[in-house]
Amino acid sequence: MKIIGNLVLSAAMTLCAIPIFGQVEEPIAFEDFAPGPYEVAVTDIDAGDAGAPAEMRIFIPATTDGKPLPLVYMNHGFLVQNQFYTRILTHLSSHGFAVIAPQMYGRSPLPFGKPSMTREAELGERIIAWALSDLGALTNVSIQESQVSLMGHSRGGQVAWNIARRGNVDVAAIVGVDPVDGQRRDSVTRDGLASIPSLTLGAGLGGSCAPDGRNYENFFAAVDTDLTQWLVVGDNFGHMDMLDGSCGLPCSFCRSASGNNSPDQFIEAVSGSATAFLQLQINNKVSATTEVEAYFALTPGYSIKLD
């Protein structure tokens, strides 16, 4: 087990006053887009440590109230390594979530010998079961035994939805980070997705890495419209622009941000949107929707739909 350290995200909380009919309402604090109140302990463990089914990076907030922490499972994209999501997941954890980000297979950037989507989903189920039973003892915190939230980037989004569809995990919410579906029999969107509240985050420049017919649009079109469903699209960002720096060979095949669009801004938008959505679904934070609407009203280059 390797302790990476306690990470503290520092940024001033942004306030926004929305004028209505010549008057100014109380300022809206973009709490979920700013770093949360908790320091985050980041730890890497190997497969087999405390019985863990896979190598993973763990994010634990230094909460003080002793309440069980809600669990978020993050599935990395195809050929992408788990540590490239550290900024997003540290942000999320700083708002009170325990986050696990497993490495689902070896770190070679070559596509040979990688598991199928179904095999990844089966391993994901074992990892979640391990986290619910053993993560608390490993990290000296209490973990909620239900209401697991799933996240996944690229093919990891497909894997997350497949875990939900299989029905072996009590899934409270799903966040798809520019998810990419499989083809034909491997498609999870073809027959509609499981009835679970979801946030779909899209990249407008997905290109060949997130092709039309298999990208975020298909996922959002397949969700259950009777439940909370959010869509946030960064119109001028690429499929890998939410990662920590370049991911090497896999990133070289994907288009990146155009013009003056900074990947740092996309990371902030993705982190804040995911945090706000999970705060709404897990912690019943009713102001989350208003906060997201106000944030993107002042942040050009995004298309949103909050249902």
Image (spheres, rainbow, N blue to C red):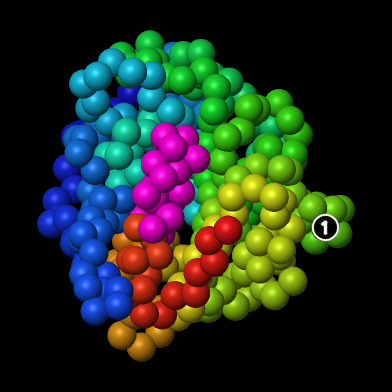
Q: In the displayed structure, would residue 218 be above or below residue 4?
A: below
Where, quadrant-wise, is the C terminus in this rendering? bottom right
Query: What is the magenta segment's predominant secondary structure?
Result: helix
Q: Is residue 287 visible?
A: yes
Please identify the quadrant where the N terminus is shown.
Answer: top left
Q: Name the residue nearer the viewer: 130 or 37.
A: 37
What's the amino acid at mark 1? Arg
Query: Which image quadrant is residue 297 in?
Result: bottom left
Q: Which residues are magenta?
A: 270-290
Which of 19/31 is in front? 19
Residue 143: percent from left, percent from top = 42, 19
Which residue position holds label 1?
190
Residue in the picture at 30% in, 47% down? 91
Does 116 appear in magenta? no
Query: Helix or strand or loop: what does disc 1 sit on?
Result: loop
- Tell me the residue at 41%/45% (across/down): 286
Residue under the point 24% across and 43% down: 36
Q: Position of residue 44 (x, y in %)?
A: 35, 32
Tell me: residue 206, above or below residue 229. below
Say if 100 sits above or below 250 in the image: above
Please tell me which residue is depicted at 61% across the width and 33% down the height of the picture.
Answer: 171
Q: With 144 as the anchor, is 123 left or right in this view?
A: right
Q: Position of residue 138 (x, y in %)?
A: 36, 15
Q: Residue furthest bottom?
A: 259
Q: Is residue 295 left or right of residue 289?
A: left
- Residue 267 location, quadrant: bottom left
Is residue 161 found left or right of 40 in the rendered image? right
